[in-house]
Image (cartoon, grey):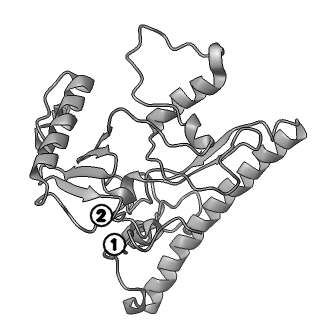
Amino acid sequence: MGLFDAANTPLSPPEHAKWGALPDAQREQEALRMQIHAAMVDRVDQNVGRLVAALKTRGAFENTLIFFLVDNGASHERPGRGKKDPKAPWGTVGSFEAIGQSWANAANSPLRKWKVQGLEGGINTPMIAHWPRGIRAGKGSICREPSHLVDLLPTWMELAGKDAVYPAAFRPLDGISLVPTLHGKALERGKPLFFQYGSWQVIRDGKWKLAQAKSGPWELYDLSTDRTETRNRAGEYPERVADLKEQWYAWYRACTGKDWKGAAGKTKKTPKPKRKK
């Protein structure tokens, strides 16, 4: 399909068990996990189809902008929480299973890692835009402009025109409009994209991405030549690492009013005292 270029997208190291090495019983179990996952995807597909059919019935399909995107990377979790009936067949209401690390690794391939992680397998997600009367980029075209969810509101505001008024009392918008990409044009983003979730800190500035897990060393990647983050360039560009890191600290300070103390320095909730019976 042309989504990836082999020249700059080496396959990231696999982090899952080899299928052929699994016992037959475990392979059947793992296959069932993906069958249930596929069934859920089918439910989504059918209901998107219902929305499309309704728009066509109303004569609004050709002039409706549809954005479809998925969550932040396939989940590696095997839930150990919540109510679960061990006797319930998988996929039924009483069960609580997930695809787990191996399938998440495969689902996010060729990108590294998975949901909650700051590498591309955890924060990069495909998005489909459909708008027959509005998109000028060409049917089936692929846009590679780095974008973020913070860009959606500015996009909708530009499309709404004078009917959309952003309250002056609110803090300035972080994102920019994606409308140029609908016409096949590049974005002119004036500042980097910033991320902080869980134990990961990330900044993306053009082709460069700096990422840190917990309080570990910052890793630098050139996504234009290494889309799958297989070569850490931090040792080659210490000045760039220092600059991007300081920008990330400044962004965090602007958002929270506090200095970043590292993942280990986060404020922990004080546990409530247990009541005596």
Q: Amino acid at mark 1?
A: Ser
Which is nearer the N-term, disc 2 or disc 1? 1
Q: As rendered, which of 252 and 74 lies closer to the eye?
A: 252
Label 2 Cα neighbours within 10 Å, binned few <14 / some 14-19 / many ≥20: many
In the shown orientation, is residue 163 left or right of residue 174? right
| CB within 8 Å, label 2 to label 1 | yes
In the shown orientation, is residue 239 left or right of residue 184? left
Quarter of the figure with the N terminus: bottom right
> For the residue labelled by badge 1, is the local secondary structure a helix, a strand or a loop?
loop
Which residue, given by chain and number where applicable, does mark 1 sit on? 12
In the shown orientation, is residue 277 left or right of residue 92? left
Q: Quadrant of residue 55?
A: top right
Q: Residue 76 in the image: state x and y as whole percent.
A: 38, 63
Q: Is residue 81 visible?
A: no
Quarter of the figure with the C terminus: top left
Q: Residue at x 64, y 19 (%)?
A: 161
> For the residue labelled by badge 2, is the local secondary structure a helix, a strand or a loop?
loop
Q: Residue 174 in the image: state x and y as whole percent.
A: 39, 28
Which residue, given by chain and number where applicable, does mark 2 sit on? 229
Q: Residue 185 in the image: state x and y as whole percent.
A: 55, 43
Q: Residue at x 64, y 27 (%)?
A: 159
Q: Quadrant of residue 164?
A: top right
Q: Is residue 9 above or below residue 162?
A: below
In the shown orientation, is residue 31 left or right of residue 122? right
Q: As rendered, which of 145 and 63 lies closer to the eye?
A: 145
Q: Amino acid at mark 2?
A: Glu
Q: Is residue 91 above or below residue 196?
A: below
- How many marks the image carries: the answer is 2
Question: Spatial distance from mark 2 to mark 1, Cα to Cα?
Answer: 7 Å
